[in-house]
Amino acid sequence: MVVMDNVDEEATGDGENNIEEDVTAEESTNDENHEEEVGGDVKDDLVGEIITTIEFLDNISDYRRTQQKECFNLVRRLKILIPLMDEIRGFDEFPSPESCTHFLYRLRKVILAARKLLETCNNGSKIFLALDSEMIMTRFHSIYEKLNRVLAKIPFDELKISDEVKDEVGSLCKQLKKARRRTDTQDIELAVDMMVVFSKTDPRNADSPIIERLAKKLELQTTEDLKTEAIAIKTLIQEKGGLSIETQQHIIELLNKFKKLQGVEATDILCEPVINKSTSLVLPHEFLCPITLEIMQDPVIIATGQTYEKESIQKWFDAGHKTCPKTRQTLEHLSLAPNYALKNIILQWCEKNNFKIPEKETSLHSEDDSEEQQKDEISLLVEALSSSQLEEQRESVKQMRLLARENPENRVLLANAGAIPLLVQLLSYPDSGIQENAVTTLLNLSIDETNKKLISNEGAIPDIIEILQYGNREARENSAAALFSLSMLDENKVTIGLSNGIPPLVDLLQHGTSRGKKDALTALFNLSLNSANKGEPSMLASNLGMIDEALSILLLLVSHAEGRQAIGQLSFIETLVDFIRQGTPKNKECAASVLLELGSNNSSFILAALQFGVYEHLVEISSSGTNRAQRKANALIQLISKSEQI
């Protein structure tokens, strides 16, 4: 939700045939190569590898907090397969041994994909996993899809599987179907805090309380934790080619904010010495391209005086960027000047240290061809949007939705090809499927800051709000997410409020699915940061299905002067006292926290709460509430005593 790469979670379920191809088509060649090897040894090797992998995963206990629950759920489901593997290993004769081997190869592929994901959640960058939690959840769902399809085609009769194990596998398939349709509600406070610290315009992005809260939630509070995280980030940047420069810088900046909390000197980890894996040779950081972190072969200087590998910076410019990746300054021009001096120094150093510069895996020519093919494909899709054939329009917007979800480059290419005005026109098209895919495509395109402006300039906001009111479930949820994304621009906050976008968001908050409520809640929070919408935040607390989440958002709001001014009304104070009086234990705890924050900054809020009889309820909570509620109640009682003395 915060940096919304691959935010379109439902896209993975758009075409079940795509999942089937994922599991089978890529494997068919490999499986054919192995079909002659259908003896017991191959079968036993595959079964042994699958069991060993599952047992290895079962021994991992330290998953990142942001994905911990989903990791344990996946491992628990994989363990159900062990009795199945034991029965297959124990049976030596099969009427059709190739069908057994084919099934095991397919299952092994899914298990290895699960292992890769779980290892990422075990030792990956905590900041990145929190930042890209939506995409990580999509990967979990993809594994559930693939595993379910593999298990659905088990030749039970040929494999002589017992009825008991059959039932266990059947139960597992039901779990997988349910799991892949469900999206857990994120930690709302974590999501909002991440949104704030990564915002370029929000003045609270450096607020110590928010940084401290994030450090605690991400468990990055010790020097050792920060060292480990720095290594994980460098590994991520070096190995994940699709990680944008903006995202790299965001992650590094947040890491440095955490370092400052611990009194550790903030550094640019990209400029720290890199150890060459093969020779343990320390490469001088000035030899490394800031984009790829690889030693430069053709260094060039751009307008800011920074040096980059020519191929890397040219790709950056070709993607539509007009800033320096490292300094983020807007460039006066995009000219490249060869850095002959640095190139000679690099060559001399390599010769002196007997270091051979690695050859590039792919040629520039082949990459250029691939990019041209992508541009041609996108051009045809944009042209098809204007087709008179309904089915052609449907297929085009569906493919655009997937392309816009894949990577930043596609979002720029789609916008440059003129897709946005046509997609905005389709928002009012009388076809629910086209509407849903159009609004979701715009959601994915809006991840790009430039595209946010293009979308809003085309007048998309009123149409998105209309889909939020009258569209199908998926369209409504993705409309809420689109409004959240677009509201990152201050001018759009005002437009959404004036276009009557807040009431349907509140309605979705009250009656939507878990995912819909999450998107509506974060959109409402973002909108409430603008003074033009200041009358609306109190609506959050009226939603009886989301009281705790709403109060968590309100707690963030009242920690700032604008938020206190916006919601510190008598009607709202009375609502807080009602929660303190008759809410659930958690309601009482959250409401007391909000009132304490209000009262600590302005005694008039305390006096107002006293008028509504809060004192006796605080005394009751101080003796019978949750531990946290007791602390908040006692602090409020002390605050009341001070107010009375004054």
Image (cartoon, rainbow, N blue to C red):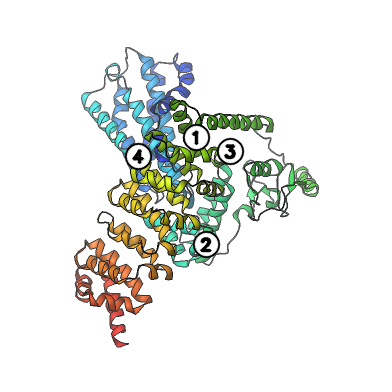
Left or right position of 135 against 511: right
Q: Work out how far the residue at label 2 is from the one at label 3, CA to CA, in angstroms.
A: 34 Å
Q: Is residue 138 left or right of residue 349?
A: left
Residue 284 in the image: above or below residue 632? above
Q: Secondary structure at mark 4?
A: helix
Circle 2: is it few (<14), some (14-19), or many (20+) Cα within 10 Å?
many
Q: Which residue is mark 3?
A: 413
Residue contact at pointers 2 and 4, CB within 8 angstroms: no
- Vertical placement of 643 versus 12: above or below? below
In the image, what residue occupies the spot 73% across and 52% down? 303
Mark 4 to mark 1: distance in Å? 31 Å
Whether residue 58 can be seen here? yes
Question: Marks 2/1: CA distance?
Answer: 38 Å
Q: Amino acid at mark 4?
A: Leu
Q: Is residue 504 left or right of residue 37?
A: left
In the image: residue 329, left or right of residue 126? right
Q: Earlier in the sequence, mark 4 or mark 1?
A: 4
Q: Which amino acid lies under the numbered mark 3 shown in the image of this protein?
A: Leu
Q: Point out the tag, 2 or 3, that comes first from the N-terminus.
A: 2
Q: Give the residue drawn at x 43%, y 33%.
A: 112
Residue 74, label in figure: 4
Q: Quadrant of residue 46?
A: top left
